[in-house]
Amino acid sequence: MDHKPGNDCYRILFLGDVVGRPGRNAVHEYMNSLVNTFHPTFVIINGENSAAGVGITPDIAESFFREGADAITLGNHAFHKREIEAYLNKDKPIVRPWNMPKGTPGRGFTILEKAGIRLAVVNLCGRVYMDQYGDPFALIDETWPSFEGAHVFIDFHAEATSEKIAFGFHVDGKAAAVVGTHTHVTTADEQILPKGTAYITDVGMCGPWPSVLGMDREIILRKFRTTLPTRFEVAEAPGVISGVIVDVLKETGRATDIRRVRRPKQGDDI
């Protein structure tokens, strides 16, 4: 991949679920380098696990904006820190799952404007093995006019790979990108779908490694071996960055490229 997008494209950098202090430290350590290397127009971060491994606080959200995030997406742990509720009602580009009940604090999408591009950043939760969320397929169908002609980037926070893939095809040709979050495990299926939507089943996490999904591996092993109730704790290990770079045509809002990015690098990551 060229370090700069072509003149007909703009670029989105998306970072997967930030887990605890190690994830936050990794964002702080690598963000400037990623921005200076890849020149994204928009930077989006999933921050739903950034406060001690579950939820987010206003102070942490503000730290991500200072690091250069244009928007923050959340997920099923969006409200695990009570102090975030009032913050979500402020005029900030932070979004919780759109398919939550009416009256839930916050909003499900935000529209960013930069360099002549309008980008709607949408957060949705899946329903398979998850809490009771509304139908994301029906919701997205009903409300495309809400995006006011903007290009659309969707963080689909879901457990089941089949649901994520199905949703990607459901919006193929309408959304610029659908990126999966929630499982914390990076998949190797990044692709441009037939009608021009960039897709990956899961971006992975920004968090401690080695660990089990960001949690202390010895605690998790004990849980699997004994099945006894266990309090999970974020691993005390160096943080890694997992994300994707997406190039999108300015005129049509269709993607031309999607690549995994990891710091420190591993395998074929860029």
Image (tube, helix red, strand yellow):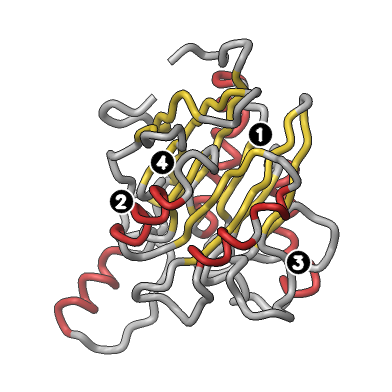
Q: Is residue 203 visible?
A: yes
The relative height of residue 6 versus residue 172 in the rendered view (above or below) is above
Label 1: state its secondary structure: strand
* Dot 1 or dot 3, earlier in sequence: 1
Residue that label 2 marks: 210
* Dot 2 or dot 1, earlier in sequence: 1
Residue 21 placement, left or right of 263: right
Label at residue 88 = 3
> Three-letter amino acid code at disc 3?
Leu
Frontmost of labels 3 and 4 is 4
Outermost residue toward the bottom? Answer: 228
Q: x%, y% of residue 253?
A: 59, 31
Residue that label 1 marks: 42
The relative height of residue 225 versus residue 175 in the rendered view (above or below) is below
Label at residue 108 = none
C-alpha distance separating marks 1 and 4: 17 Å
Q: Residue at x 56, y 59 (%)?
A: 141
Frontmost of labels 2 and 4 is 4
Frontmost of labels 1 and 4 is 4
> Three-letter amino acid code at disc 4?
Tyr
**Mark count:** 4
> Three-letter amino acid code at disc 2?
Pro
- The quarter holding residue 57 reads bottom right
- The quarter holding residue 80 reads bottom right
* Dot 1 or dot 4, earlier in sequence: 1
* Dot 3 or dot 4, earlier in sequence: 3
Q: Residue at x 25, y 67 (%)?
A: 218
Q: Quadrant of the C terminus?
A: top left
Residue that label 4 marks: 199
In the rendered structure, are the residues bearing label 1 and label 3 in contact, judged by CB atoms less than 8 Å apart? no
Dot 3 crowding, Cα within 10 Å, few <14, some 14–19, many 20+? many
C-alpha distance separating marks 2 and 3: 32 Å
